[in-house]
Amino acid sequence: MAKTVDQYFDNLRDTRVWRSIFRSGTGSSTLKRSLAIQQNVFLHLFSTKVRRRMVSFSATWYLGTLTLGTFLILVVTGILLMLYYHPSVPQAYADTKDLQFVVSSGLFLRNLHRWSAHAMVFLVFAHMFKVFYRGAYRPPREFNWVIGVVLLLVTLLLSYTGYLLPWDQLAYWAITVGSNIASAVPVFGDKIHFMLLGGNLVNANALLRFYVLHCMILPLAAIFFIAIHFWRIRKDGGLYALSSEPSTLQKAALAKEAR
Amino acid sequence: MSTKDFVTGMDSNARKSPRRVAFITRRTSAQVKVADEETLQTFPEVLFRAAVAIEVMAIGLVTMALLFNAPLEGIADPSHTPNPAKAPWYFLGLQEMLHYFPPVVAGVLVPGLVVMALIVIPYFNINIEAEGIFLKDRQRRLQIFYIATGALILFLLLFHVFVALVPTLIVAAFMILAAQSSPQSSSALRRYLASKPLSYWIMSWFLFELAVLTAIGTFFRGPGWSWVWPWRS
Ligand code: HEM
């Protein structure tokens, strides 16, 4: 008897090797599907079930999911770009030029990284406003909203630190304009400015600092807080399902109960 | 314990959801706010949808990366300042404000306050209850609204921030319309506006200003941060 593709998969999932890696085993019962989530170190951040109406497009516009998507693209393209890039002056600029003209697919990589970065900043704002307008910051989700604000700042910093790395005129002066704002902080302004740039002007030290922030510290911070963000959604009882005016809805529910 | 001190309940469909047993002791009120509703398994249904959403977006971004090149100008030259020197687009709202206000205000105070305001949103009961702003205590609230809006407009005029007046006036006009409306109004728009709480109005004003200032910084500013028309360059 001919086997279906599903049966081949089931056989594969029943092998000793597969079962040594994924413990949930074969079968498509609800239990097995729940175990597939619960027994996976990454997936267990999520709950095993989601309310059907929160999966519809209108509920979230998938903006949080898409923000994650841009972040994943940025990590992959970013690692590949790092293979061709030296954070030193003037080598950084020469490397960017090489990516543009010499490295195969370098131009594509750089383009994809750049446009995804813009998309991520836009999406993170859009996600924040969508969450606000559907009232999903309400208790018990208040701390996840705060985590979100941290993620917004991390995203902005990621994009901002990356802006300097090509070491062209655009990069240099955008960072000069931006970092001068730090000097306006009362009392400590100049100290903060100096610490950020590793000098009084945007120079090779600043490039190195921004590189370390952009490729190490901020991505790790983003991963750390995104993990907490997702785990908190599960812990807070899944996505917020009431519309943006729970008071009216609750009143309606109470009135129904009283009848 | 008498039999009335607790209630137990069981979901009879064990295949669909785990059994739940609820003990409700005497002094707690057992208010059922949300009934069980239909759910999907995260694996594979929800993850599949997420993957599709991300893939569709990835196709869009890849297409863009194939069609449009990221900008790359000449090598950084500290002795040659481009005019205007612009920050990345998401900071151009800030840079536009720097044009009107001293750096401590536009660069430190305002962004600091915005971040603080965002953080505290979920910690105020007024935002949780989210009653329509003018539904209660209408006269007094309308007075406060007029004073606050008047002060804001005066402040913007004083610093010549005329562009920021447009969103302010539009949002204010909608708020006045909201004050003249009630949940019984005949038009759907009016019922909608009447139900909106204070946080909604502030956030919408903020979003509107953010969009306008960012757009102006991006498209309408030229050499020396002077006003230019993007179609006349
Ligand atoms: C790197 C940035 C971020 C990522 C990857 C991310 C991802 C997500 C995802 C996937 C969800 C699930 C539902 C949805 O798509 O809306 C979600 C929910 C949520 N996000 Fe974000 N988010 C980010 C930033 C933010 C920001 C900036 C805020 C707000 C300031 C925020 C607040 C929330 C809240 C409160 C929820 C729960 C909504 C609910 O319970 O219905 N997040 N996030």
Image (cartoon, coloured by chain):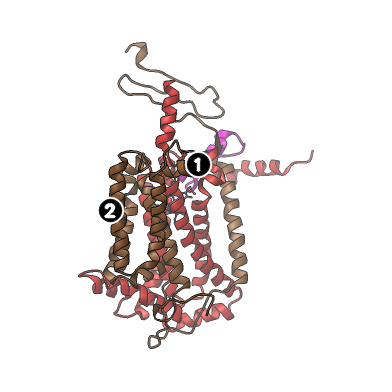
Chain colours: A red, B brown
- Callout 2 amino acid: Ile
Which chain contains the residue that carries disc 1? B
Q: Nearer the viewer, residue B183 or A183?
A: B183
Judge the density around disc 2: few (<14), some (14-19), many (≥20) Cα neighbours within 10 Å: few
Quadrant of the rendered structure where residue A199 is? bottom left
Q: Position of residue A26 (x, y in %)?
A: 61, 38
| The residue at label 1 has a CB less than 8 Å from ligand 1 | no
Residue range of the region highlighted in magenta in the rendering? A24-51
Label disc, if present, on residue B188 of the rendered structure: 1
Q: Front-most of B216 and B42?
A: B216
Question: Is A33 a magenta residue?
Answer: yes
Who comes first in sequence, dot 1 or dot 2?
Answer: 2
Q: Which residue is mark 2?
A: B147
- Badge 1: few (under 14), some or many (20 or more) residues near its Cα, within 10 Å? few
Outermost residue on the top side: it is B2
User: Residue at position x 41%, y 69% from top?
Assistant: B92
Q: Residue furthest left?
A: A187
- Check if residue B80 falls in the magenta segment: no
Q: Farthest residue toward the bottom?
A: B79
Asked if labels 2 and 1 touch by Cβ distance under 8 angstroms, the answer is no
Q: Is residue B95 above or below residue A68?
A: below
Residue B198, given in percent of the width and then of the height, sits at 35, 47
Query: Is residue A29 shown to the viewer in this render?
Result: yes
Q: Which of the 4 quarters of the picture holds residue A87?
A: bottom left
Q: Chain of mark 2?
A: B
Q: Could you give the CA–CA distance between mark 1 and mark 2, rounded to whole angstroms?
A: 29 Å
Compared with B39, A150 (above or below) is below
Residue B8 tag number: none
Q: Quadrant of the N terminus of chain B?
A: top left
Q: Where residue A156 sits: x, y (%)?
A: 41, 63
Q: Residue at x 57, y 55 (%)?
A: B54
